[in-house]
Amino acid sequence: MIEDKWQRGERRIITIIEKFTTYKNWISFMQLSIEAKIEHQTLTNYIDLLIKRGIITEYRGKIKSRLFCMSGHHDDIEYNEKFRTFTQNDSMSKEEADEELSK
């Protein structure tokens, strides 16, 4: 029973990360936690295991953020981190952030 619950949680995390990777984005730990509805310590355990297996890739940001995507789907992480900073901290819309970064 525990193994089934663990596998369901693992599959849910992979599905969420795949969804974000499809749109060429990395997902943050906090966003993943909210989407997956899993407590932080359990989520950390899942993530560590998925990284060890090579299923997902982790990027540690400049402001100690943890970002994740599916392995093999790396894109411009610097662009994504700046995009995240603009949309979260500066309250820019996605369109405004894209325009700012294309300058």
Image (cartoon, helix red, strand yellow):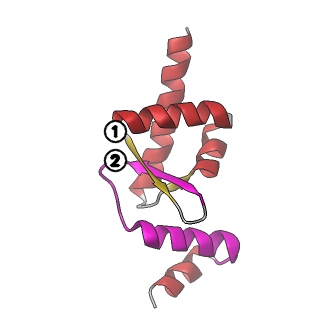
State the residue in front, 29 or 91: 29
Report helix, strand or loop for mark 2. Answer: loop
The label shown at residue 71 is 2
- Residue 32 is at least partly visible in this image: yes
State the residue in front, 36 or 62: 62
Q: Check whether the beta carbons of the residues at disc 1 and disc 2 lie within 8 A of each other.
A: yes
Q: Does the magenta stretch include residue 93?
A: no
Report helix, strand or loop for mark 1. Answer: loop
The magenta span reads: 64-92
In the displayed structure image, the side of residue 18 where residue 34 appears, left or right: right
**Amino acid at pointer 1:** Gly
Q: Residue 50 at x, y = what percent? A: 43, 35
Pointer 1 local density, CA inside 10 Å: few below 14, some 14–19, many at least 20: few
**Residue at 64% in and 50% down:** 30
Q: Residue 59 at x, y = what percent? A: 46, 55
Which residue is most to the top?
1
**Amino acid at pointer 2:** Ser
The answer for how far apart the CA atoms under marks 1 and 2 are is 7 Å
Is 30 rendered above or below residue 49? below
In the displayed structure image, the side of residue 15 where residue 43 appears, left or right: right
**Residue at 58% in and 57% down:** 65
In the displayed structure image, the side of residue 34 where residue 82 appears, left or right: left
Q: Residue 3 at x, y = what percent? A: 50, 13
Is 87 rendered above or below residue 22? below
Pointer 2 local density, CA inside 10 Å: few below 14, some 14–19, many at least 20: some
The label shown at residue 5 is none
The label shown at residue 54 is 1
**Residue at 65% in and 33% down:** 41
N-term-proximal mark, 1 vs 2: 1
**Residue at 55% in and 18% down:** 5
Q: In which quarter of the image is residue 56?
A: top left
State the residue in front, 55 or 5: 55
